[in-house]
Image: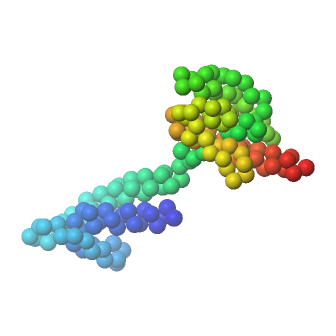
Amino acid sequence: MKIKTTVMALMMCFLLMGCDTMQVNGLSLSGLSSGNENGNYCTRNTGVCVAGAIVAGAVIAAIVSNQRDSTHGRPRPSDGRLKEDVKLVKTLDTGVNIYSYRYLGDDRVFLGVIAQEVLEIPQLADAVVTGPDGYYRVDYAKLGIAVPNEQAMQDAGMAAIKIAGFALEQ
């Protein structure tokens, strides 16, 4: 998918740069007129066009890829029922408590909030959603809190949901 995005971005850059026609490995790329009376710019300055398209295409592909792959703004499992060894670390000016804790079945220590407490703060309650499994998740971006190890937190939280769900079935 990333290669397809990069190729599409490169082709778009050729069009935006005003290339009338350009040959790249035998492939003819047609674009918009550059307005030059002596022919198109890319024919005379192929190196500039190719370098510019590669750089611009890479930037566009990176932006698109990061937006699609990013977990920032995605709710994380933060239900108090999934956490153990919970210890208060700090209370923020917003009234949000930050805790250190371990997810069920995981030895790593994370810092985060307890969703049930966030629900009790009216101006922040929209940061909490209920997952299809019935456990609360928190969108830390809505709280203005950066999560440095968010993928590890996501993985551990999802594993805890499986453990907790299994325990409830017993």
Residue furthest to the left in view is 37
Q: Which colour scheme is used?
A: rainbow
Spot occupied by residue 149 in the image (x, y as percentages of width and height): 61, 38
The image shows a total of numbered marks equal to 0
Residue at 78% x, 50% y is 162
Q: In this view, does 49 lie to the left or right of 25?
A: left
Spot occupied by residue 57 in the image (x, y as percentages of width and height): 37, 59
Image height check: is 50 above or below 63? below
Q: Is residue 38 left or right of residue 44?
A: left
Q: 144 or 125, which is in the foreground?
A: 125
Q: 139 or 5, which is in the foreground?
A: 139
Q: 95 or 14, which is in the foreground?
A: 95
Q: Is residue 54 left or right of residue 39?
A: right
- The answer to whether residue 108 of the structure is visible from this angle is no
Q: In this view, does 15 lie to the left or right of 132?
A: left
Residue furthest to the right in view is 170
Residue at 61% x, 22% y is 91
Report which quarter residue 5 is drawn in.
bottom left
Report which quarter residue 124 is drawn in.
top right
Spot occupied by residue 153 in the image (x, y as percentages of width and height): 66, 41
Image height check: is 100 above or below 46? above
- The answer to whether residue 97 of the structure is visible from this angle is yes
Residue at 36% x, 64% y is 10
Q: 167 or 159, which is in the foreground?
A: 167
Residue at 48% x, 55% y is 65
Image height check: is 149 above or below 69? above
